[in-house]
Amino acid sequence: MTNFTQKLLGSIRQSRSIIYFSLQMILVLSGALLAVTLGSVGVAVGTSVIATGVSGMVVFGWVIFGDVEEDKRRSADAFGFVTAFPNRSIQIKSEYDIRLSRASKRIDIMGFGLNSLREDYAGSFGAWANRAEVRILLVDPDSPGGQATYADLRDNEEGNDPGRTSEEIIRFINDTRELWEDPRIAFSLRLAKTITSVNIFRIDEESFWGPYLISQLKRGRTSRNLPTLIVQSPGYMFDRLVDHFEEIWNNDQLSRSPA
C-alpha cells in the first residue's frame, strides 16, 4: 500500500473527512438519480450536481496528496538531505570545489586509500589548512593484522592487484608528512583500525558521504562510481556521520597516529 493510499484511508476514517467525503458521494449519486429519472432537464441538472461532487472529491484527494508530500519534505529536512549523485570524486568535483572555496571551519575526510583525493587535491591541502582545520582518516594498512588486512580485502573486492590499497595509503602518508608533522599547520592524519563502510567528506556544515558496495564493484565499478549523498546540519544523518568520525578519530583503540 502506497503512502498516499494509507494517508487517504486514514483521513477518511476521521469524522470530518467522513462527513465531507460522504456529502460529495451523495451529490454524485443524487446527480445520477436526477439524470436517470427526470429526462433531459434531469440530465442537465444531474450532470452539474455530479460535477460538483466529483470536484469536491478531487479537492479532497489533492489535500491528502499535499499532506503526503509535506510529510516527505519534513522527513528530508529532519535527516538534513540536500541532494544525491550516482558517483563521487572527479565526476562531481565541481560540487566539492564550490564548498571547499568557502570552507572556514572544518574539513573531515574518511576513506580507504583516498588515492583520488590525493590525485585531485594534494596541491590544495596546505591552502585548506590555512582556512579550516583539516583531519583525514585513512585505513590502517596493518589492521587488523594476520594474513589479510582490511586494505587487502578491499583489493580483492575491487579486483585490484594485491597490495595496491596499502601502497596508496603509504604514499598518502608520505606525501603529506610535512603537513601533519608540523604542529603549526592545522592538518592532521590518523589511521583507522576499523572496517570502513562509508566514505565521508565533511566541509563545514555539509557532508558528502556514500557506502562501499560490493555488488557495484563486482560489475566492474570502482569506488569513484559509487553513489554519493549530501547532508547538512541541522540533520539527523549529518549528526550521525559526525559522531561516527569523532568516535574513530578520538579513540586510540579505533585509530592511531601514522608516526
Image (tube, rainbow, N blue to C red):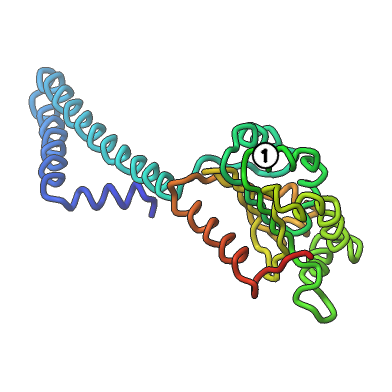
Q: Quadrant of residue 121?
A: top right
Q: How many marks?
A: 1
Residue shown at 57% from the left, 61% from the top: 246
Q: Amino acid at mark 1?
A: Asn
Say if 35 sits above or below 241 in the image. Answer: above
Circle 1 SS class:
helix
Coordinates of residue 148 in the picture (x, y in percent): 82, 76
Picture coordinates of residue 188, whole percent (x, y): 69, 54
- Quadrant of the frame with the C terminus: bottom right
Q: Which residue corresponds to mark 1?
A: 130
Residue 3 appears in the figure: yes
**As drawn, is 148 to the left or to the right of 78?**
right
In this orientation, which residue lies closer to the viewer: 150 or 52? 150
Residue 106 vertical placement versus 143 (above, below): above
In the image: residue 179, left or right of residue 63: right
| In this picture, residue 49 sits left or right of residue 105 | left
Q: Quadrant of residue 39?
A: top left
Task: Tell me if residue 54 comes above or below residue 141 in the rendering.
Answer: above
Q: Say which of 11 and 254 sits in front.
A: 254
In the image, farthest residue toward the right: 161
- Disc 1 crowd rating (10 Å Cα; few below 14, some 14-19, many 20+) is few
23 or 211, which lies in front? 211
Residue that sits furthest to the front in the current view: 184
Asked whether residue 229 appears in the rendered view, the answer is no
Q: Residue furthest left?
A: 38
Residue shown at 29%/49% (left/top)?
A: 7
**Residue at screen point 16% across, 22% down:** 48
Q: Position of residue 187 (x, y in %)?
A: 70, 50
Q: Quadrant of the N terminus?
A: bottom left
Q: Give coordinates of residue 36: x percent, y percent.
A: 14, 30
